[in-house]
Amino acid sequence: ARMQRETLNIAQLIHFFQTGGLEQLALRLAQSYQEQGHQAHVIAYEDGPFRSKFEELGIQTHIVPRPPRLSLKFVGTLARFFLRNDFDVIHTHHVGPMLYGVPAARLCGLPVIHTTHSNEHLLSPQEIVKEAAATNYRRVFSYLAKSCQQIITVNQRLKQYLQENVKVKAPVTAIANGVDAKQFHGRHPVEPLAQELGWTDDRPRI
């Protein structure tokens, strides 16, 4: 019944509201959800300066503090938060939000999408000497991925790594990070530069 609603209540779960590529992507996705008529929420474990960017656009933000150590109790905390806010879809980003967000969504019977932004936490000890827990991370990732409706990677190589090295069986789709061209278009005078560089009208300009 939830997924039959015309307007969905979509929550993204991220680690913190710092200024970074992951957070920029979460912001663009939340904007896109709003433009399509859905409700957009972003939940983080920790606050940060980038939170104001979401709130300026009317995107609802939440802080749910995560315990410093591994905590099964926190899965229940997140699940109760999801239910209280009547979310329809949970979208987790990166390893920390996946670790708690996927089982919490499963407890609530909610569909979950996960985006993997990099794979340094999944590499072997030989590739990163200090990452002795990499094998366990791969096992946990593979297990949690079974509860995801979709795994998204930010490039084709990462998709291949998850399928071949982590043995992920869930559907994996590579979607390259995009840039909203509207934030640049028309903001800079083109003609003086075109004359200086000798551009002609029949050539594409980027």
Image (cartoon, grey):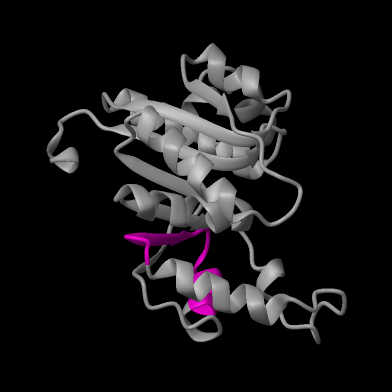
Q: Is residue 107 magenta?
A: no
Left or right of residue 94, residue 151 in this image: left
Residue 153 x/y as whole percent? 49, 61
Q: Is residue 165 visible?
A: yes
Q: Residue at the spot x=73%, y=23% of the render?
A: 49
| Nearest the eye: 116 or 192 | 116
Residue 158 x/y as whole percent? 55, 70
| Nearest the eye: 54 or 134 | 134
Q: Residue furthest right?
A: 130
Residue 34 x/y as whole percent? 35, 24
Q: Is residue 203 visible?
A: no
Q: Residue at the spot x=51%, y=18% of the render?
A: 186
Looking at the rendered image, the quarter that the N terminus falls into is: top left
Instruction: Locate residue 184: give its quadrant.
Output: top right
Left or right of residue 78, residue 136 in this image: right
Count of residue discs: 0
Q: Is residue 38 above or below residue 126?
A: above
Looking at the rendered image, the quarter that the C terminus falls into is: top right
Residue 187 x/y as whole percent? 58, 17
> What segment is highlighted magenta in the picture?
147-162
Q: Residue at the spot x=52%, y=50% of the render?
A: 75
Q: Residue at the spot x=37%, y=61% of the render?
A: 148
Left or right of residue 177, residue 48 in this image: right
Q: Is residue 97 above or below residue 65?
A: below
